Image (tube, helix red, strand yellow):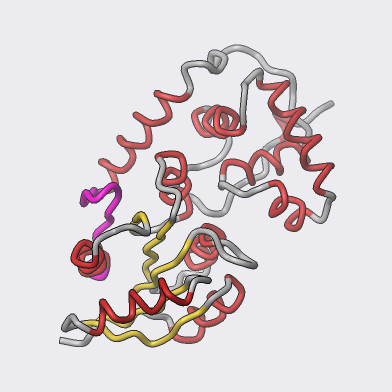
């Protein structure tokens, strides 16, 4: 049986070396490359197309979620295992939405990481240490959205229309992007992004970015599993 070809992406050398050491003790894995920032990582993945990439969410340059979306959009065969130091349900939703095959905290035990990698290489999806099929992932996400949307307005309540630019910003928010990342992507200033986010929260009558993202996803403005996010349609633009 051919070994599982793995690329490791993290800006902390000690973490990368720890993963390398773990995989070297196991049969069936071969580390074929490492990267420390997002731009180098995407170039390496495109060049080598590993079976699995272990990818940190927070990276210099492109972050792990952006890289995952690129991998999915480009139809690369690589499956993504996202790892993060900030393990929470909201970030897991962003991981699901980006197209990741698994999402793990960085404090994961070596034997558990090996288990996840074997499952992902075999075509499975692993979230919260559980192997889930597409329906189960969707049900988990729905439960999470139900839990955080209670304080938002009713889905049928009319809202003030969002401009095309506000919809673009909101689409980025639903992808887990920071204001700085949104500014760079859209070619606008950081302060302008902050102004747009403030306007979005006011128009949607929600308290924070998470509620805004949940509100947009539950109304179907953006698709949870589609990394190619539509920036809105004519029904939402200001007249």
Question: Considering depth in this image, is 190 or 138 the residue closer to the camera?
Answer: 190
Looking at the rendered structure, the number of numbered marks drawn on it comes to 0
What is the x, y in percent for residue 90?
46, 39
Horizontally, residue 140 falls left or right of residue 201, namely left
Q: Give, as a single range, the part of the protein colored magenta.
A: 121-133
What is the x, y in percent for residue 158?
65, 14
Q: Is residue 37 above or below residue 155?
A: below
Question: Considering depth in this image, is 50 or 30 the residue closer to the camera?
Answer: 30
Name the residue rendered at 40%, 39% in the picture: 89
Q: Residue furthest front?
A: 14
Name the residue rendered at 36%, 54% in the picture: 105
Q: Is residue 174 above or below residue 72?
A: above
Question: Considering depth in this image, is 108 or 92 the residue closer to the camera?
Answer: 108
Q: Is residue 19 above or below residue 185?
A: below
Horizontally, residue 5 falls left or right of residue 210, namely left
Question: Considering depth in this image, is 157 or 112 the residue closer to the camera?
Answer: 112
What is the x, y in percent for residue 98?
48, 54
């Amino acid at each position: 049986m051919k070994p599982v070809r793995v690329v490791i992406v993290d800006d902390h050398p000690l973490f990368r070396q720890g993963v390398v050491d773990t995989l070297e003790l196991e049969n069936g894995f071969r580390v074929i490359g490492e990267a420390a920032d997002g731009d180098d990582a995407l170039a390496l993945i495109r060049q080598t197309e590993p079976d699995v990439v272990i990818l940190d969410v927070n990276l210099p340059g492109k972050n792990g979620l952006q890289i995952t979306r690129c991998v999915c959009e480009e139809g690369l065969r690589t499956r993504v295992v996202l790892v993060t130091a900030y393990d929470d349900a909201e970030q897991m939703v962003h991981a699901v939405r980006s197209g990741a095959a698994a999402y793990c905290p960085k404090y994961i035990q070596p034997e558990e990481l090996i288990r996840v990698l074997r499952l992902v290489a075999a075509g499975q999806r692993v979230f919260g240490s559980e192997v889930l099929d597409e329906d189960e992932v969707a049900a988990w996400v729905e439960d999470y959205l139900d839990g955080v949307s209670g304080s938002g307005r009713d889905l049928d309540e009319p809202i003030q229309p969002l401009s095309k630019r506000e919809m673009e910003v909101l689409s980025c928010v639903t992808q887990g992007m920071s204001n700085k990342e949104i500014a760079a992507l859209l070619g606008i200033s950081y302060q302008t992004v902050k102004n747009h986010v403030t306007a979005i929260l006011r128009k949607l009558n929600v308290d924070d970015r998470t509620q805004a993202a949940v509100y947009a996803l539950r109304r179907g403005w953006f698709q949870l599993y589609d990394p190619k996010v539509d920036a809105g349609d004519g029904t939402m633009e200001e007249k």
